[in-house]
Image: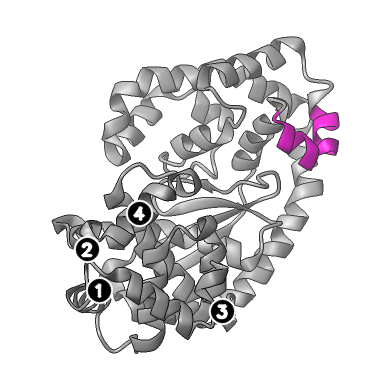
Amino acid sequence: MDIIFNDCYNLDLLNLLNILSEDTVYIKTYPQVYAEFGHPLSLDSMQIVHQISSALGSTLLSPPLAFTISLIPKFDQKPLLDIFLDPEGFQEALEQYAPRLLPQKDQLFLLFQVLAPVIKELELLGFRDYWISECLPLIEKRQKVMEEYSLQSNYLSLIREMFGLSNLPEEIHIYLCALSAPNGIRLAKHSCITDITFSDQKIFDFALHDAFKTFVMNWNSQGNLNVLAKDPFIQLAFEKGIPAHGIESIEKFLQENIIEALKIHLLNKGGLLPDPFNDLQNFKQGAYVLSMIFLDHLHWNFTGTEPLEAILEDWIENLPVGNLMICYTQALGRAGINLGDV
């Protein structure tokens, strides 16, 4: 598996729509960009942006748009207007990569058509020149740092050691953008948008989530984790933690716990997370108690010589289901965390 860092004008052009929709966080983060392109934008274009925002129920327009265009081959190389006005190419991409979206094809393409005049006006206002002069140098500087870090670190060997080549995508593409903060955006085909202001840890954490999720979901396709849902401590953590973790299904909650433990273990081994247990304890207000138990197991038992599938199966087989509070307390103790402080 390779991790590839990219720039993409089209994605930052879509990110600009979040600012123009007058999302308060984005205006506060990018006041100069809003002054540069929001103030001179025509009333017709502003009305279109607000209408789309109202229809989607969100001022964040770029996530659904970016994900949709990322299904299209070479979306980062084609002019965005050409993508927005090519129904045949869009349909071919959906048929090949996301057939589940075909029933929404007409609505999605109508969204492209409605936004096309706005995109055209932003380019006439000089956004491409602005992006090349103001954004691209910062992106390229961040890209160089991330590429050098990836080469110098042992992340790729750690990932291969943990998962094995058969469980990993061939490539993960990380698109570094200058107008995405504070949000990352998940794209198709194991790709994502992260902002140049994100820390190295946040970039890797966000980018690796989908690859790890694919592994865990495939491994759990036969319901290997279901037995843990019977434990009252896990049930209580799931139910009480819903406001923090926002997951309505205990099955998905169990999977996300495993994914988080795997990511934190990898980030720790790669040198980006020196205090993994305290970091996990602060994540989602400490709701991921199963993550703490599994992270403790990985920390003290995973040597890299045994397949991860076998590690998971042996771990579950030997857990005292029905009394996992003991395992959680032991994990905290080994990490130097006082249960009374939790």
Q: Nearer the viewer, mark 4 or mark 2?
A: 4
- Residue that badge 3 annotates: 151
**x and y, in percent, of residue 47 in the image:** 68, 12
Of the 4 image quadrants, the one containing the N terminus is: bottom left
- Residue that badge 2 annotates: 219
Label whose residue precedes the other's in the sequence (1 or 2): 2
Above or below — where is 302 with respect to 197?
below
Dominant secondary-structure state across the stretch colored magenta: helix
Label whose residue precedes the other's in the sequence (1 or 4): 4
User: Residue visible at 53% across and 60% down?
Assistant: 283
Disc 1 crowd rating (10 Å Cα; few below 14, some 14-19, many 20+) is some
Q: Are marks 1 and 3 in contact (CB under 8 Å)?
A: no
- Residue that badge 1 annotates: 312
- Residue that badge 4 annotates: 236
- Region rendered in magenta: 23-37
Q: Are marks 1 and 2 in contact (CB under 8 Å)?
A: yes
**x and y, in percent, of residue 308 in the image:** 27, 76
SS under mark 2:
helix
